[in-house]
Amino acid sequence: MKNFDSLSEQEILALAISLEEDDERIYADYAEGLRGEYPETAAAFDDMRGEESEHRRRLIELYRQRFGEHIPLIRRTDVRGFVKRQPIWLAKPLRLGAIRSQASAMEEETRRYYEKAASRAHDASTRQLLDNLAQVERTHEHRAKGDLDSTVSLHEDEARKKLLVLQIVQPGLAGLMDGSVSTLAPVFAAAFASHQTWTAFLVGLAASVGAGISMGFAEALSDDGSLTGRGLPWIRGLVCGLMTTLGGIGHTLPFLIGQFNLAVGIAIAVVLVELATITWVRRRYMDTPIFSAAMQVALGGAIVFATGVLIGSW
């Protein structure tokens, strides 16, 4: 993957064309999926799709004037800093709230890209077009959220919530899930293999701290936040690392109890609380259906837990 700052103006325009094409297709899928139950929202996405098509046409016209007919295929996945999106066909049935939230995030990301690209453009016509498109994307953000008539305070509340999710909740949830689930196997394997609570505690402590350090660095190095609005990488890394460690420490602390069966029982109870917390956070901030979130978390936790017990019992 290339860093954004290393892109030439030709590559910046080629990527912009690709972004508009992707967004156009996504909005077409949204409109089609919502047309039966939410025809007005579907019509809004149809309008946005048409505008994205016009943006792409203007970008292609400018590209031809400056660089000729051949447009290199540069995708968002080729450039560091973009958030990974779930494919539309995996998200069915489409839910209105989740669609509006994702569409708003898409437009915010594209707007940030145009603003940063315009600041690096040396050609006046390129800078003007990118600035204009950034302004249009800003209106798309509001339309995607369905709140064009809302008050300023509501916009500010929504912006603060979005920043909270991007900068704190997402990395924190990723860390909590990894720490709570990935450390189950080594902790319970050590416990059932040795039947010594102190040994299980040391293994759990090492696994939790090690996973926290690894996840913290991985999150901090994933992107610099300049295009995604996800904030300072060291803050995200710190949040992710601490939550990863916390997720593992929770079911490790009961093994400080000297009585083996009691320690295991309390540790299992703590695991259930951790998984329930993860399910609630995913439902509250990620718009994941409660049943789907619970099944995914419970299934993953059960498999890892069973693996640890099985290995430790050999």
Image (tube, grey):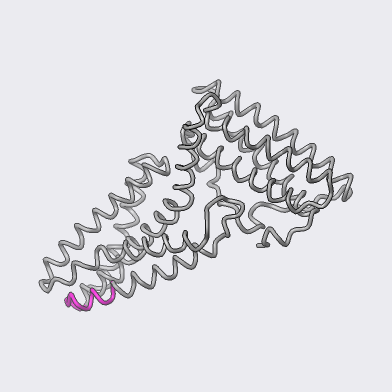
| Residue 252, image x, y percentages | 24, 68
Residue 30 picture location, percent across and down:
57, 33
Q: Position of residue 253 (x, y in %)?
A: 22, 68
Looking at the image, residue 279 lies above or below residue 8 = above
At x 26%, y 77%, the residue is 202
Is residue 274 shown left or right of residue 254?
right
| Region in magenta | 194-204
Give the mark count: 0
Q: In the drawing, does residue 75 fall left or right of residue 187?
A: right
**Magenta span: chief secondary structure:** helix
Q: Position of residue 63 (x, y in %)?
A: 83, 46
Quadrant into which the N terminus falls: bottom right
Q: Which residue is drawn at 68% across and 46% down?
A: 115
In magenta segment, residue 195 = yes
User: Splitting the image into 4 quarters, where does residue 89 fall?
Assistant: top right
24 sits to left or right of 40: right
Q: Nearer the viewer, residue 7 or 130?
A: 130
Q: Is residue 225 magenta?
A: no
Q: Is residue 153 above or below residue 305?
A: above
Q: Vertically, is 64 above or below 204?
A: above
Closer to us: 265 or 97: 97
Quadrant for the C terminus, please.
bottom left
| Residue under the point 65% across and 52% down | 76
Between 192 and 164, the one nearer to me in the picture:
164
Q: Which of the 4 image quadrants contains residue 41?
A: top right
Residue furthest toward the front? 153
With 251 as the anchor, is 169 left or right in this view?
Answer: right
